[in-house]
Amino acid sequence: MSNFYQALENSFTTNLSGDALRLADGTVWRYQHLLERVNDIARTLVAEGLQPTDRLVVQVEKSAENLALYLACLKVGGVYVPLNTAYTEAEVDYFINDAQPALFIGQSVRTDVQTFTMDEGGQGTLLERVAAHSGNPVPATVARQPDDMAAILYTSGTTGRSKGAMLSHANLASNAHSLSTCWGWQKDDVLLHALPIFHVHGLFIASHCALLNATPMIFLPKFDAAQVLQLLPQASVLMGVPTFYTRLLQQAGLNHASVASIRVFICGSAPLTEQTFNAWEAATGQRILERYGMSETIINTTNPLVGERMAGTVGFALPAQELRIADGDGVPVQNGEIGTIEVRGPNVFQGYWQMPEKTAEEIRDDGFFITGDLGTQDAEGRLSIVGRAKDLVISGGYNVYPKEIEGFIDKIPGVVESAVIGVPHADFGEAVVAVIVPSAEHVDIATIHSHLADSLARFKQPKTVVNVDALPRNTMGKVQKNILRDQYAGLFSGN
Ligand code: AMP
């Protein structure tokens, strides 16, 4: 039986009287209750016509019921397709049209697909259907093959059409088991879960570790720094994006005592700066464990639980997974050189939904997936990410890696954070532009040049600087450089 839900159920039913979800309003779901809700929703999905391999598109606010819905979908052999709650109706149109679901659980009723809203009470809600079908038998968990699809995660798609990454039951299972071991999950762990569950981080990486070990999650609808700080003493693991850590650092109460119960702080989905890593250690005495993953592969690499966690690096490939830094043809480069990060292993997805050409472009014949991230590996195999390939700036024929420059700019007094982009330039092809969030006074280009003169070659230094109040970020804390590039595309159009 390769249905990953069965592995989770086998584990958490060993602790039915234990807490599964501790909710913000004080309600607690024991594992017994979670199991019952999964069964209730599973019988409802079947009764409403969801067949194995059918897609279930879901766009709802995070809740305990939402997690049970995900598990129920796996149980009945459906393919779970979560959507960011921020997507507009026009965006949802695209996903519905692309995924062709049998059922949509969303925020508003659609006419092109059978739809239920989630909310309690009233006609047409999933929970009302659950009550209506309560007399039906609980369906058995549907047998699945390891490569059968369990979920489609649409990538954030900053350029072109959003692609649906197809993840199999074996993809989910292998990564969940690996992470549980690598991060030393313990029977008394309590996960503070403040991530959204429409994304790989909160849905798979965080939840699976807790469920597979039948341990509790403090399950918050969203991240609120003051609330998380207050709840830290009740938890032993926090998983977050870098923004969680930068916001917590602004809380007056963050100190060694406030994190005394935490066994490990884990961070990923976007780059953690050295400054944040160091500031966190100074404030709490703990080193954040940074790891690197993506929708297509779940987790690729992690810093060690035991051993040195190094700022600016994302650690080693998980056991049974491979990593190589390659040139454009997939040929490994020398240690220390920058190249494209390629990965292979049981975590690598099955391809893009209904995009065989895209799949063929990004998964090589030898099974390595071209991640689109650029990085370097040291002699021990430790990976450092230098940026997304599409964010690389080529100025005057030279490659400029934004992260290197951002690292120097972020250290300049008066700079809170920065994003380096390339914009069209008649002479150079692209010109390096620094977009800066200043702490008070605007930072000018002369100041930047004076600080970078000794550290960076002239061609890497920004040609101009733009001061902004905040960088555009998506819900996972990633800086949306495509927006900046569009916004400042005309900066040098007079040249
Ligand atoms: P997503 O599919 O939305 O999870 O986005 C995956 C992308 O996030 C990766 O390809 C990386 O570019 C980025 N990412 C994830 N973790 C890290 C990390 N620790 N450091 C830098 N970038 C990261």
Image (cartoon, helix red, strand yellow):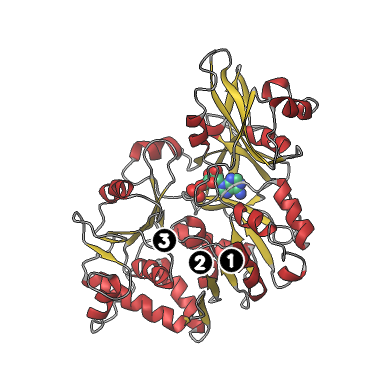
Q: Residue furthest left?
A: 111
Is label 2 in contact with label 1 (beta carbons under 8 Å)?
A: yes
Q: Nearer the viewer, mark 2 or mark 1?
A: 2
Is label 3 in contact with label 2 (beta carbons under 8 Å)?
A: no
Q: Nearer the viewer, residue 413 or 323?
A: 413
* Residue 42: % across, % down: 31, 73
Note whether 34 is above or below 80 in the view shown: below
Return the residue at label 1.
180
Q: Residue at x 66, y 59 (%)?
A: 248
* Residue 363: % across, % down: 45, 40
- Would residue 141 be seen by someone viewing this image from the given angle? yes
- Whether the residue carrying mark 2 lies under 8 Å from ligand 1 is answered with no
Q: Residues within 10 Å of mark 3 (few under 14, many from 20)?
A: many
- Report helix, strand or loop for mark 2: helix
Q: Residue at x 61, y 62 (%)?
A: 225
Disc 2 residue type (three-letter): His
* Residue 241: % across, % down: 58, 54
In 3D space, how far apart are the residues under numbered discs 1 and 3 (Cα atoms)? 17 Å
Q: Nearer the viewer, mark 3 or mark 2?
A: 2
- Would residue 1 be seen by someone viewing this image from the given angle? no
The quadrant where residue 318 appears: bottom right
- Whether the residue carrying mark 3 lies under 8 Å from ligand 1 is answered with no
Note whether 174 is above or below 467 in the view shown: below
Q: Residue at x 62, y 46 (%)?
A: 271
Return the residue at label 3.
169
Disc 1 residue type (three-letter): Ser
Return the residue at label 2.
208
Note whether 149 is above or below 263 in the view shown: above
The quadrant where residue 411 appears: top right
- Quarter holding the N terminus is bottom left
Q: Is residue 215 left or right of residue 113?
A: right
